[in-house]
Image (spheres, grey):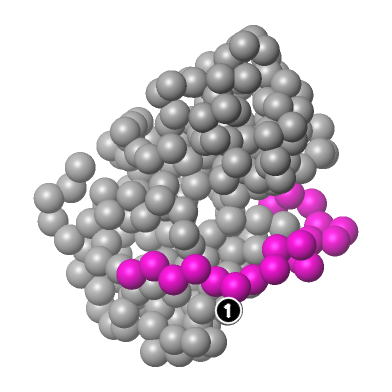
Amino acid sequence: MPTSKVMLLSANLILASGSPRRSEIMKSTGFNFVTQVSEVNEDLIGEGLVAAELAVALAEAKARAVAREMPDAAVIGADTVVSKNGVLYAKPQHSDDAHRMLHELAASSHTVITGVAVVANSELLSGHVSTIVNMRNYDAVEIANYVESGSPLDKAGGYGIQDESFMPVASIEGCYLNVVGLPICLTGELLSSAQIISSADHPTCAGHNSLRGLSV
């Protein structure tokens, strides 16, 4: 993990998320920031949108909501969506929902899309990253034990790639941190474009796509 901090050129930095995974990714990259959860009703966003559009729309809504409260800060919003054959998998509503999702995703491939948005200096910048995830053929007992732990309930698709107690993923094609919940390369690119960090401090994916040990 990095030993130096990323220097901000202007504004305070806020991560509009309560996700411990996103916070740990930011900390591991050297960002000095605070968190503030947005009060966005996600159920009111997304009708008619495909996965990538939904991820970006939700990220933008979260960033805007916090930026309205803190107009002098730079705000990062993010949202992760799981999609398989056009079906979207959000966070499970309850244990039965988590069981269903994990059964449907087992021994198959799906796409994880994270939208990232930055609001700074009255400007909105956003984008998304997609990663193909290939799940292993875990069994019903493993699913039951994992769901009983409660871990799936705050994660899109009902799983965490970093969860060493379950390890549901066989392989990925693309960015690991995107699947965890925050593609740091895109985040740095947006912050650099908004002139919140210098291009020299723009984090790269090298050394981060294999990052483990994040909270589940």
Magenta span dominant secondary structure:
loop
Q: Position of residue 113 (x, y in %)?
A: 62, 45
Label 1 Cα crowd, 10 Å radius (few <14 / some 14-19 / many 20+): some
175 lies left or right of 140: left
At a point 72% along the width and 57% down the height, the residue shown is: 54
26 left or right of 114 in image: left
**Residue 82: x percent and y percent?**
67, 40
Can residue 133 be seen at all in this image of the molecule?
Answer: no
The quadrant of the rendering that contains the C terminus is top left
187 or 16: nearer the eye? 16
Reading the image, the residue beneath label 1 is 65
**Residue placed at 31% from the left, 59% from the top?**
202
Is residue 73 positioned above or below 208 on the image?
Answer: below
173 part of magenta stretch: no
Q: Nearer the viewer, residue 200 or 176?
A: 176
| Residue 6 drawn above or below residue 141 | below
Q: At which x and y percent is residue 140?
A: 67, 12
Task: Check the image and name the residue furthest to the right.
Answer: 48
Dot 1: element: helix
Residue furthest to the left: 3
Instruction: Give whichever of 152, 148 is nearer the camera.
Output: 148
Which residue appears at 46% of the width and 49% of the height? 183
State left or right for residue 183 relative to residue 87: left
Q: Amino acid at mark 1?
A: Ala
Q: Which residues are magenta?
A: 34-52
Q: Quadrant of residue 83?
A: top right
Q: Is residue 38 magenta?
A: yes
Point out residue 87 in the picture as x, y percentages from the top left corner.
81, 39
The answer to whether 89 is drawn above or below residue 123 in the figure is above
Vertical relation: 203 (above or below) 176: below
182 and 201: which one is in front?
182
